[in-house]
Image (cartoon, grey):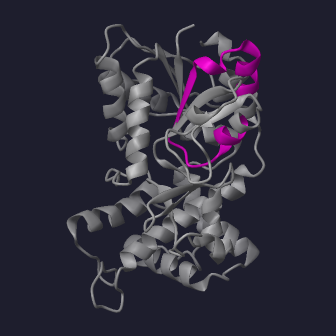
């Protein structure tokens, strides 16, 4: 069997029970109201002000079921574009001497933490589909032929891979507390590559030391909220930051570790013969992904086999047709579009490989 890359998009996590990004805000504010939990007053107040001014939504008093929330991408793209253009919105400034100095930066950070909080809540009790997939690939003896590529921030696939003792997980970067699998002396270990090109909720970065730490298979970014001591670098006491690139048109790919991950991803994908997209709709905003895949597709001497697995119960026909058009116009017509779900793939991957 030729080496295969399994690309995990948001639909793969959604199949486990995690919310899609278009539902993040509704779930977050409904949970706050249900629990009457406004203990982090500053964060809730700032988010409330942002939604009220920019989207005319009162998240504290309106009926949340009747609100047409912006997507996470829309809400954070406004801030990213303002930073890129060095512009501000009224009462939401960049770095200056005003009272609302760098309010844009704080709101952006709060939105990322909001996403982390919702994902942590919804992925703590999952269906176990990723686990089923890894167990089946292990039974078939195919794990050594797999490369995993994920745009998801959660640690569903991380936990599934780490549950097997014979696997040494290679993220493509070195962590201060997790040695590179290439340095392992245990030759019985299978090195499995997992490239999380948009970052991960279990990565924390110190911008002073320029070092990356792995919070093993937990969505550790929430420590920035729940345990302030965990937000400090043990070496220099600087505040650590998440390594997360939100799904926007204006992605900031400047983090040196993410650049390494992208380079390793491209290098590894050059050797694959089959690329399987799971739960990924090939959105217009992901031009970085499209660029990467196009390089893999064209800079080779043989053809790349491509399979798309992105069906789910109740999926509308017009959505299926539009999705096929996006894939086909960019990657060509020689693509296998299945009618199967991620759950089908996990239970019987040999049918597709």
Q: Nearer the viewer, residue 323 or 214?
A: 214
Q: How far from the left and from the top, in percent, is residue 343? A: 69, 28
Q: Residue furthest front?
A: 185
- Looking at the rendered image, the quarter that the N terminus falls into is top right
Q: How far from the left and from the top, in percent, is residue 229? A: 65, 76
Verify whether residue 288 appears in magenta: no
Q: At x 46% / y 30%, what residue is drawn?
A: 318
Q: Is residue 115 above or below residue 316?
A: below
Residue 73 seen from this side: yes
Verify whether residue 146 appears in magenta: yes
Q: At x 28% / y 67%, what residue is drawn?
A: 83
Q: Nearer the viewer, residue 335 or 217?
A: 217
31 horizontally vs 55: left or right: right
- Looking at the rendered image, the quarter that the C terminus falls into is top right
Q: How far from the left and from the top, in percent, is residue 314? A: 62, 33
Figure quadrant of residue 303:
top left
Q: At x 67% / y 83%, what residue is drawn?
A: 39
Q: Is residue 91 above or below residue 66?
A: below
What residue range appears in magenta?
133-160
351 horizontally vs 5: left or right: right
Q: Is residue 333 above or below residue 123?
A: above
Q: At x 46% / y 42%, what residue is drawn?
A: 197
Residue 67 seen from this side: no
Q: How many dots with numbers?
A: 0
């Amino acid at each position: 069997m030729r080496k295969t890359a399994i690309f995990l998009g948001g639909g793969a996590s959604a199949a486990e029970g995690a919310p899609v990004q278009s539902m993040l805000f509704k779930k977050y504010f409904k949970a706050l109201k249900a629990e009457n939990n406004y203990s982090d007053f500053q964060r809730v107040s700032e988010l409330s002000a942002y939604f009220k001014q920019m989207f005319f939504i009162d998240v504290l008093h309106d009926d949340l079921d009747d609100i047409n929330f912006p997507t996470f991408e829309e809400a954070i793209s406004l801030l990213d574009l303002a930073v890129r253009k060095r512009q501000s919105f009224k009462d939401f400034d960049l770095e200056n001497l005003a009272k609302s100095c760098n309010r844009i930066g704080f709101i952006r950070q709060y939105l990322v933490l909001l996403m982390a909080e919702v994902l942590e809540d919804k992925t703590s009790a999952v269906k176990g589909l990723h686990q089923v997939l890894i167990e089946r690939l292990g039974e078939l003896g195919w794990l050594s032929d797999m490369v995993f590529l994920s745009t998801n921030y959660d640690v569903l696939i991380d936990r599934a891979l780490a549950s097997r003792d014979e696997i040494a997980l290679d993220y493509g970067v070195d962590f201060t507390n997790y040695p590179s699998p290439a340095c392992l002396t245990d030759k019985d270990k299978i090195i499995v590559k997992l490239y999380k090109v948009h970052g991960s909720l279990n990565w924390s970065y110190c911008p002073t030391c320029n070092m990356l730490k792995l919070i093993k298979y937990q969505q550790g970014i929430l420590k920035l909220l729940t345990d302030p001591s965990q937000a400090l670098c043990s070496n220099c006491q600087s505040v650590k930051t998440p390594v997360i690139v939100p799904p926007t048109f204006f992605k900031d790919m400047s983090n040196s570790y993410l650049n390494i991950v992208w380079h390793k991803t491209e290098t590894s994908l050059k050797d694959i013969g089959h690329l399987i997209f799971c739960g990924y709709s090939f959105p217009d905003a992901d031009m970085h992904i499209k660029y990467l895949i196009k390089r893999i597709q064209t800079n080779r001497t043989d053809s790349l086999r491509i399979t798309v697995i992105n069906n789910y119960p109740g999926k509308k026909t017009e959505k299926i047709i539009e999705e096929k058009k996006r894939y086909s116009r960019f990657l060509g017509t020689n693509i296998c579009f299945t009618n199967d779900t991620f759950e089908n793939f996990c239970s019987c991957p040999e049918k597709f490989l």
